[in-house]
Structure formats: C-alpha cells, structure tokens
Amino acid sequence: MIIESKRIGCLDGLRGLAALWVLLGHSLQLTGWHLPILSSPDLGVDLFIMLSGFLMVFHYRLRESANPWEKPSTWFGFWLKRFFRIAPLYYVMLCIALLLGPQLYASRMVIDTFLSHGPQLPERYLDGSLRNLLIHASFLFGLHPAYAFRTPLPDWSLGLEMQFYAVFPLAMLLLRKARWLPGAALIALGGFVVAKAVQAAHIDFPMPSFLPLKMHVFLCGMLIANGLFVTPRQTVMNGLLAVMLVMIPIGGDMTSTKVAVRLLLVVGFFVLVHYHLLPGLVGKLGDRVSSLMGNHFCHWLGELSFGVYLIHLLLLQPLAAFVITHFGAEISAPARFAIVVAALLPLAYALAYLGFTRIEGPGQTLGRKVLEIIRRRRLKPA
C-alpha cells in the first residue's frame, strides 16, 4: 500500500497517552500506591521510542524522492530540524532543573524516607557544575554512565533520542541496500552484540540511555511505518519481525509481565496503523479506535506530550513531599495519589501549553528559518 495522507491520526493520541502514562506512573511511585502496568513509566517511554522510530521512517518515506539520503544536505537538514524540535524547551527546563536541584533533592528525601525507598544519588540533584551543564547541552550525556542520569529531569531518553537521530540516515541507507527484513535483523543483532559487550565490560548505565540498549525498540516503530509503503504481505512480515524484536532481552526490565505488555504495545500499534488489513471485528475496532485517537482533544494531548514529559517531575516531587509532610500516614496511598494528581495534571498541562506556544513552536520556526538561510547560501552563485 502506498499511503496518500501525510498524517496518521492515532499518533497524536498515542503520544498523549505515553506522556500521561509516564506522569501517572511516576505519581504512583512517589505516593506509594502500586497499580499493575500503570506503575511502570518505563513502558510509556518504550511507547514513545516506538513512535519516534515510526515517525522518522514515515516522514522519510514521504519525502525520499524530493530529499534523497544520498545527499549530505538531506542529512544536515534532518539533524537541524530534530535539534530545533527538542533543544529549545529542553535547554530552558535544564537550566530550571539545575537551579532548583537543592530544593528538589530535599523534596525527594522526604518522599524516599517516608516510603522507605533507597536514597537518591545526591549528584543527580546537586551537580550544578559547568561540566554537567555542557555535557547535557551537547546531548552527549547518554553515552556516559556517570552523566546519563544526573539531572532532576527524565532526560536520559532525550540523549537516547539524539543518538538515534545521529545514526538514522545510516540505518536507512543500510535498510534500503540490504532490504528491510534482513537489514532490520542485522541492525538489531549489532545492537545486541554491542550491548552485551558493554555489560561484559561491567559498564552499567543507570538508565538505558545508550542506543544499542533500545535500538530494537526503535526498529519496531520503523518496521510498522515501513508497512504503509509496501504490499500487504510485506506489511505483515514487518509486523511479525517487530513482535520478535521487542522480546530481545536487553534495555530494561524483562519480567514476563513487562515482556507481555511490550508485545501488546507492538501489536496494538500495528492494529491502529494497519487496521485496513485486518478482518472482521478486529479491523473495525482498530478503525474506530484509530479515528478516536486522532480527534481534536487527542491532537492537543500529543502536541503537549513533550512538555508534559519534561516538566512533570519538577512539579511532582514538591507536590508529593507537601502531601506527605502534611498528611503522612493519616491518609491512604490511593488518597495521596488522588490529591497529588489532581494538583499535578492542570499545572503540568498548563505549563506544557505555555512551553509549546512560547518555546517549542517558535523554536521550530527558527529552525526552519536557519535551514532556509543555509540553503539559499548554498544555492547562491559564486
């Protein structure tokens, strides 16, 4: 199937749900209430990773005739756009997080003491050094175990994302040359070998911020996206390979429950995108859910997802510490969770909206202007 639309509606809803999952998962963890699956924000991050892989391939396939990857200018344009998509809001939140580090650390100590959690590493909150700022501003922190989890933000995944952007053009050239199924298997195998070699060398990442630990998850989204541009039989084969790749035992908690949820995420994502290939009730249900997740409300959930993801922990920890300090064990864990989330949701989404309209949007506009200036200078005759 060659797709005609330039927009897949369900992606907005999926992005919004992934951000909400991370927010609720962290809220559950920091208020002491456990709900199966929802208490695992790392699964929400895995959904984000699949969506990222999907979007990169989807937009590449739409533009490959106009912007071929054989041209270095295409690579440069791709990297510049992705930088201006992530960096503006991230840089603002990074500075705020480092400035508020001592206060956030005090809040986290109140939470961890009350819930009998192991203490946080102080440097995650208290390292306001220029070196820490610069390695995060360069997005190289995900490659260094000591810096991969060294700010109060959940930014380890941003370092991972930037590594994916760095290798994406090379990966696409390989997939085109080797064909998609063997090429994807080869890339996943390479990531697995490198990840195991790093583990054998006793290099331990506190979070899976090193690309080989999560490349197979990116590939799941990439394969589902590629299915939109090939025959139905090839689409199904892409989906089957994605199901196999998501079970590779690296890059996170591999308990049976987590593996089962990741499988469901891949299958559900495939159904929402390729419902037209599925028979009977499954296809009809996929169509309806996909349409619902592309409505106006879900569109805005998706647009605000990056801001919510970045901002929520800076609000959540003081809120949880406040509730614990004033109510303690006098109220139940579900009540603590309800109070914290009731305060957190409007604050997080309001600030995310401000970030989207005042920082993210203008940042992307600036990126397009910079790229256009560079293109004009290259085309200008000597």
Image (spheres, rainbow, N blue to C red):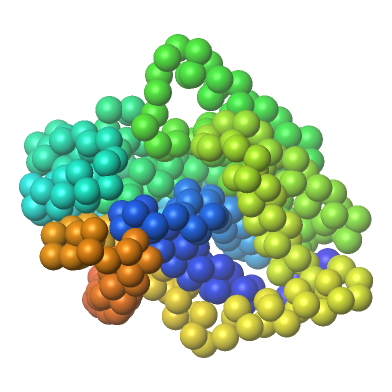
Note whether 190 is above or below 381 in the view shown.
above
The quadrant of the image that shows the N terminus is bottom right
Seen from this angle, which residue lies furthest bottom?
296
Which image quadrant is residue 134 in? top left
Name the foreground residue: 267 vs 295: 267
Note whether 305 is above or below 131 in the view shown.
below
Asked whether residue 33 is in view, the answer is yes
- Residue 183 in percent (x, y) is at 73, 36
Asked whether residue 136 is in view, the answer is no
Residue at 71% across, 30% down: 186
Residue at 36% across, 36% down: 142
- Residue 209 in percent (x, y) is at 42, 37
Give the side of residue 89 with respect to residue 302, left or right: left
The quadrant of the image that shows the C terminus is bottom left
- Residue 340 in percent (x, y) is at 28, 69
Which image quadrant is residue 91 in? bottom left
Residue at 32% across, 35% down: 148
Which image quadrant is residue 363 in? bottom left
Seen from this angle, which residue lies furthest front?
330
Residue at 65% across, 40% down: 256
